[in-house]
Image (cartoon, rainbow, N blue to C red):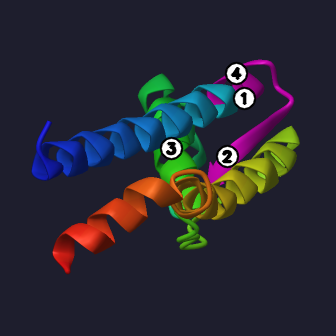
Amino acid sequence: MSRRAIIVYNILILFFLYMTIAAFFAFLYIAIEILELGSIVDHHASISHQQQIIDLFTRSIYFSFITLFAVGYGDVSPLGLAKGVAIFQALVGYVLPYAIILNYLVFKPKIIRWHVKKRR
């Protein structure tokens, strides 16, 4: 496999990993709201709009992505048990890039040395 193919493969793996994690937490927020253990509140939407099922899905997906990527616009906030889940998701969002970097620097140093020698 060529170096370019390996890079594309790794980027796709990383993309699907982030999508899977964000989807998992979005469904967790949906379950929390359905079980009435907490909710995700949109501060710019009316109460009647937030009661629609499609808004529950879009709000949960949106909140999951902005929490995972540590953006945090402040327009959507967790309440109840969703606060604890959001803290854990933010922690995953912060730790995951470091884990990926450490995977290549610490656990695969031979590959890095091989690429450095090849460039010289």
Q: CA distance from mark 3 to mark 1?
A: 11 Å
Residue 49 at least partly seen: no
Between disc 3 and disc 1, whose residue precedes? 1
Q: Is residue 34 left or right of residue 112?
A: right
The type of residue carrying mark 1 is Glu
Q: Please report contact status of discs 3 and 2: CB closer than 8 Å, yes or no.
A: yes
Label 1 SS:
helix
Residue annotated with mark 2: 40
Q: CA distance from mark 3 to mark 2?
A: 7 Å
Label 4 SS:
helix
Q: Is residue 4 left or right of residue 31?
A: left
Q: CA distance from mark 1 to mark 4?
A: 5 Å
Q: Please report contact status of discs 3 and 1: CB closer than 8 Å, yes or no.
A: no
Q: Is residue 24 left or right of residue 19?
A: right
Q: Quadrant location of the N terminus? A: top left
Q: Please report contact status of discs 1 and 4: CB closer than 8 Å, yes or no.
A: yes
Q: Residues within 10 Å of mark 1 (few under 14, many from 20)?
A: some
Q: CA distance from mark 4 to mark 3?
A: 13 Å
Q: Start and end of the magenta stretch?
A: 30-42
Which residue is depicted at the point 79% across and 43% down? 85
Residue annotated with mark 4: 31
Q: Quadrant location of the C terminus? A: bottom left
The type of residue carrying mark 2 is Ile
**Marking on residue 120:** none
Between disc 3 and disc 2, whose residue precedes? 2
Which residue is depicted at the point 22% across and 44% down? 6
Residue annotated with mark 3: 59
The type of residue carrying mark 3 is Arg
Q: Where 52 sits versus 82, above or below?
A: above
